Image (tube, rainbow, N blue to C red):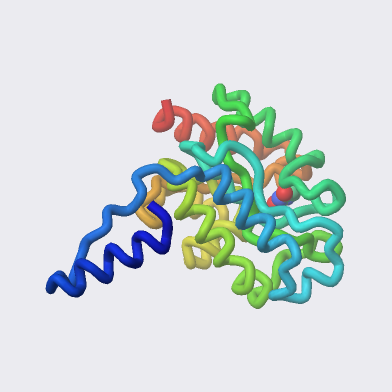
């Protein structure tokens, strides 16, 4: 039925005294198409100062129907050049970490707190996070993952709104917007401190146990 016909039909109902109708929402949304459309809308974003140094807007990549959503901090130099998240050295380590728990990058969806690279890879500023968070909130509500893995303290503090150490964050599984949420080391921290990898492995195994 076309819009015009729908309008006429609704007019008819109104004239016959029917004031309220309840429309069932569409059961299936095409998450991939929706995310693609939103990325196209946002890639020219100028909501914060990070846009001025940006080469590429890095929205997120992976499977829109993923059961697991992974959230990092912000794009680095490689990501900014290519326009995809976690493609540099820390991305390669993340791929290995996932494969250690029998997950491939194609199964999960990966994004960041901020979608544009902070200069010199500094932590994103509060105003940059605030401007960018609606994009992440929207991604979460479209993907509706069963699990979230937050990588590093920046992602955890920003989303869970608790100011504590990463060690403290790792002790608990969180309920974030009704989603079972884990916090572990950011791969770039593991590249700097390889001795933490055994702790990250403990975290990944907890996630694996719940996921499979
Ligand atoms: N570090 C992040 O937090 N995200 C990326 O996409 C790359 C490096």
Q: Is residue 72 visible?
A: no
Q: Residue at x 48, y 67 (%)?
A: 161
Q: Position of residue 211 (x, y in %)?
A: 43, 31
What is the total number of numbered labels drawn onto the structure image?
0
Seen as rendered, the residue at the extreme left is 17
As drawn, is 167 to the left or to the right of 88? Answer: left
Query: Is residue 48 toward the left or the right of residue 177 in the image?
Result: right
Vertical placement of residue 163 versus 177, above or below = below
Q: Inspect this view and state whether residue 155 appears.
A: yes
Is residue 129 left or right of 66 when viewed as pictured? right
* In front of the other: 173 or 36: 36
- Quadrant assignment for the C terminus: top left
The residue closer to the viewer here, 3 or 166, is 3
Q: Position of residue 64 (x, y in %)?
A: 54, 41
Which quarter of the figure has residue 135?
Answer: bottom right
Say which residue appears at 77% left-offset and 75% top-offset: 49
Using the image, determine if residue 66 lies above or below residue 54: above
In this rendering, the answer to whether 14 lies above or below 111 is below
Residue 92, how many percent across, how many down? Answer: 75, 34
The residue drawn where x is 73% and y is 53% is 58
Above or below — where is 192 with respect to 51? above
User: What residue is at 53 percent from the left and 34 percent from the top?
Assistant: 204
The answer to which of 123 and 202 lies nearer the viewer is 123
């Amino acid at each position: 039925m076309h819009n015009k016909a729908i309008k006429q039909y609704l007019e008819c109902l109104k004239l016959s005294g029917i004031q309220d109708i309840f429309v069932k929402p569409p059961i299936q949304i095409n998450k991939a198409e929706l995310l693609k459309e939103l990325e196209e809308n946002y890639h020219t974003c100028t909501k914060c100062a990070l846009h001025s140094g940006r080469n590429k807007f890095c929205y997120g990549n992976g499977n829109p129907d993923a059961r697991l959503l992974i959230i990092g901090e912000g794009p680095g130099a490689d990501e900014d050049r290519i326009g995809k998240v976690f493609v540099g050295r820390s991305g390669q380590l993340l791929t290995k970490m996932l494969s250690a728990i029998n997950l491939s990058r194609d199964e999960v969806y990966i994004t960041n707190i901020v979608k544009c690279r902070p200069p010199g890879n500094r932590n994103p500023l509060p105003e940059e996070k605030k401007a960018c968070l609606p994009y992440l909130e929207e991604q979460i509500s479209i993907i509706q993952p069963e699990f979230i893995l937050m990588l590093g303290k920046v992602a955890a503090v920003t989303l869970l709104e608790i100011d504590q150490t990463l060690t403290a964050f790792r002790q608990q599984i969180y309920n974030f917007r009704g989603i079972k949420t884990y916090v572990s080391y950011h791969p770039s921290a593991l590249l700097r401190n390889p001795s933490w990898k055994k702790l990250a492995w403990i975290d990944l195994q907890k996630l694996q146990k719940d996921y499979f």
